[in-house]
């Protein structure tokens, strides 16, 4: 039986692969390795996200740590937002756009470039939701900001912001790219919570680190 790659000519499949591959680019890992000479996959939480970049690089090069962390957040958000925004502007069916959003976050969390390891998906999730659910994302970011300033535990702030996003998505606030369900956003939330299980375990044990 011959194996056919004909399905790769399907536009939707191409868009899904693009979203996943872009989402999988490990910017935190690349920036820390390039500018600080640090492998963040072998230190700290071993995540490729901004919080681990800040924590690990700070031990080696405090001057660079904050800059690389901010750059990681921006790039991780953009790799989610950009393909989704372009697809939406090109008039791609909204169901396909939302599937791309899921795959971008999935790519970050299970990067094809890092043997399917990755980050927590928060910044990339913010990137896609900022395009698809702008008002709800604004509320989520406000909750995250207040929690980050008061609680100072990154995982708690992220999960509270995620909860605010889901709750506000169920409200009567406008959804410019509405497909009649928030199931794709719930799937993204489940992936992010799954990646936070080690953090949740440490929280229960009282061992989760604060961001100073």
Image: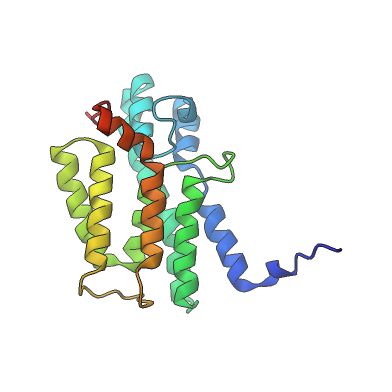
Above or below residue 14? Residue 174 is below
Residue, x 33% and y 28% (percent of image)? 55
Q: Residue at the location (27% across, 46% down)? A: 158
Residue 85, image quadrant: bottom left
User: Does residue 179 sit above or below 48 in this rendering?
Assistant: below
State which quarter of the image contains the C terminus.
top left
| Residue nearest the observer in this picture, 4 or 75 | 4
Residue 197 pos. (x, y %): 37, 39
Total residue callouts: 0
Residue at 39% over, 26% down: 44
Quadrant (top left, top right, bottom left, bottom right) of the N terminus = bottom right
Judge left or right: residue 45 versus residue 63.
right
User: Would you place residue 119 above or below residue 98 in this image?
Assistant: above
Q: Position of residue 51 (x, y in %)?
A: 33, 36
How far from the left and from the top, in percent, is residue 127? Answer: 37, 57
- Residue 65 lies, with reference to residue 169, above or below; the image says above
Residue 208 visible from this viewpoint? no
Is residue 34 visible in the rendered image? The answer is yes
Taking the image as shown, residue 69 lies to the left or right of residue 107, namely left
Residue at left offset 28%, top offset 53%: 162
Residue 54: quarter of image = top left
* Left or right of 43, for residue 13: right
């Amino acid at each position: 039986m011959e194996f056919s790659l004909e399905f790769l000519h399907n536009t939707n499949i191409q868009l899904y692969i693009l979203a996943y591959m872009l989402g999988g680019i490990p910017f935190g890992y690349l920036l820390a390795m390039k500018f600080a000479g640090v492998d963040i996959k072998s230190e700290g939480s071993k995540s490729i996200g901004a919080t681990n970049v800040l924590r690990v690089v700070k031990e080696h090069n405090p001057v660079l740590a904050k800059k690389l962390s901010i750059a990681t957040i921006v790039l991780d958000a953009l790799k989610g937002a950009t393909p989704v925004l372009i697809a939406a502007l090109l008039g791609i069916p909204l169901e396909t756009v939302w599937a791309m959003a899921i795959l971008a976050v999935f790519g970050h969390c299970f990067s094809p470039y890092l043997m399917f390891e990755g980050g927590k998906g928060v910044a990339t999730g913010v990137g896609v939701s900022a395009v698809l659910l702008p008002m709800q994302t604004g509320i989520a970011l406000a909750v995250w900001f207040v929690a980050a300033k008061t609680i100072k535990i990154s995982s708690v702030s992220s999960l509270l912001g995620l909860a605010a996003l889901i709750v506000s998505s169920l409200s009567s606030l406008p959804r410019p790219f509405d497909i009649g369900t928030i199931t794709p956003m719930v799937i993204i939330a489940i992936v992010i919570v799954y990646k936070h299980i080690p953090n949740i375990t440490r929280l229960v044990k009282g061992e989760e680190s604060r961001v100073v």
